[in-house]
Amino acid sequence: HPNLVVGGTYSGQIVLWDNRSHRRTPVQRTPLSAAAHTHPVYCVNVVGTQNANNLITVSTDGRMCSWSLDMLSQPQC
C-alpha cells in the first residue's frame, strides 16, 4: 500500500494515514486496549507482499504485536 503512512503513538496506539485522503487526522487507529500495546510504540515495520501487508510493532511494554492492515482492531500479541 504505497499510499499509507503508519505510525505508533506514546499511548500505544497504531495510527494509519492515507495520503490520498485530504484529512489531517488518521483514517484508522487501533483502540486503546489491554490486548494490545499499553506503553509507547517505538518500532513499526510493514511486512508481507504487495497485496497482503501486516504490521509488526514493538512497544516499551515489552510486547511485539502483529496486525493486519485490514483489521487493526485485532492484534496478535
Image: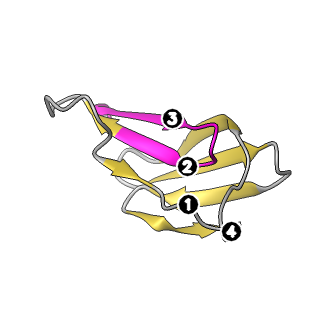
x 58%, y 38%: residue: 9
Quadrant of residue 41 within the rendered picture? top right
Q: Residues within 10 Å of mark 4 (few under 14, many from 20)?
A: few
Q: Residue at position x 61%, y 38% from top? A: 44
Please give the residue where the numbered disc 3 appears in the rendered image.
7
Q: Which mark is residue 13?
A: 2
Pick the quarter of the image with the C terminus.
Answer: bottom right
**Amino acid tagged 1:** Leu
Which labelled disc corresponds to residue 32? Answer: 1
Residue at image location 28% in from the left, 45% down from the top: 27
Circle 1 crowding by C-alpha within 10 Å: few under 14, some 14–19, many from 20? some
Q: Total marks drawn?
A: 4
The numbered disc on residue 52 is none
Amino acid at pointer 2: Gln
Q: Secondary structure at mark 2?
A: loop
From this view, report whether residue 38 is shown above or below residue 16.
below
| In the displayed structure image, the side of residue 35 where residue 17 appears, left or right | left
Q: In the displayed structure, does residue 75 sit left or right of residue 24?
A: right
The front one of 3 and 10 is: 10
Residue 34: mark: 4
Query: Could you give the CA–CA distance between mark 2 and mark 4, rounded to whole angstroms?
Result: 11 Å
